[in-house]
Image (tube, rainbow, N blue to C red):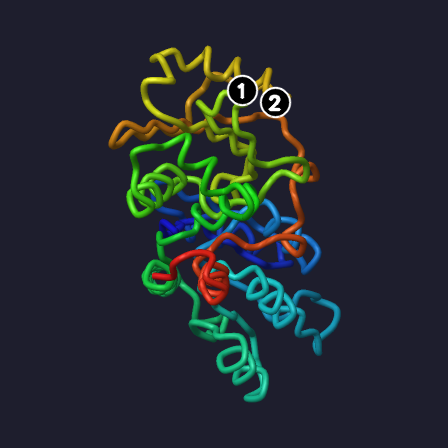
Amino acid sequence: MMPLENILVVEDDPRWQEIYKRWAVPTDGGCLRVARDLAETRDVLARRAFAVALIDLRLSEDDHDNIDGIHVMEAIAAFDDYTSMVLITGAASVGVMREAQLRLGALDVVEKRAIDPSRLSELIRRGLVAHAKAVSSKACAWAFLFEQAGEHDWCGQLNALLRPHTWLRAEHFFERLFQPILPVVPRRAEALIINPTGRVGYAHCWSRRIGGAVLVCFGRSRDFDGDLPALASRSEAISGESANYDIFHQYSADGSTGVVFNLPGRDRSTFAELNQTRAYTARAVAGASETGRVDDN
């Protein structure tokens, strides 16, 4: 999976929210999202994946014993996005700090009074580096397509679409095609559709990288005829989705072509919950490889 640059701030104090918005500026291609509590964090995580999370330990100004930041860290860790988590606290016990770092893998635990633009920039830089080292581009898209196609005719479907690709070259093609939108979540309804003629495949998913729905079309280059609006129209007729013709990403190699279209206005609820499907990240792929389904990196 291509490294993310999205930043999540979990902070209940409006003053500190504004400070983070000014100081925690994402690099090109990234976004910053703010959540006030555990419930908002879970909602944001369902829509997007994050490279770095800055988490306030106490998420209630009225409760001095509040440690909801630990529960937020547990929720983030459950998504398996390799998010670098920084716990920020006014005053934390040794036990809380050890739990954050040893059990939940916090990148760092820092005192809020020590935060300034330079320190925050360094924490984010360390978090992005740690995230980039943890993620991998191997097999994430391959695992997604394999699962959605079904084991019984997966080989036949992909062979018809991408011949004369070898499996290794096909895997590489799909990783490059899906790279800008991973991690993804499949549509609740049929997520992968192969044109009855065997010419073009359509994958419907929610991209947690960009926080929106996408339609991925792929097949042999000669079957695209250079007419991408017509391709989107065919996908609407076959899949029931209406694609806008704004192309988000396109990739071609070795006689195969793939195009990613934005699907604006789609509701997140029409896509699977993350606890109902694989999280298509390197960790999930490592588990799948134990069954012999895909190759781990």
Residue 147 position, x and y percent, is 54, 48
Residue receiving disc 2: 241
Residue 70 position, x and y percent, is 62, 72
- The amino acid at mark 2 is Glu
At horizontal 66% and vertical 45% (from top left) the residue drawn is 272
Above or below, 262 relative to 124: above
At horizontal 52% and vertical 70% (from top left) the residue drawn is 88
Residue at the far bottom: name it: 94
Element class at badge 2: loop
Residue receiving disc 1: 235
Q: Determine crowd level at label 1: few under 14, some 14-19, many 20+ residues with C-alpha closer than 10 A.
A: many
Quarter of the figure that contains the C terminus: bottom left
Residue 174 position, x and y percent, is 38, 40
Above or below, 21 relative to 282: above
Q: Determine crowd level at label 2: few under 14, some 14-19, many 20+ residues with C-alpha closer than 10 A.
A: some
Residue 41 position, x and y percent, is 63, 55
Q: Are marks 2 and 1 in contact (CB under 8 Å)?
A: yes
Mark pair 2, 1: CA separation: 7 Å
Left or right of 65? Residue 17 is: left
Q: Is residue 83 visible in the rendered structure shown here? A: no
- The amino acid at mark 1 is Ser
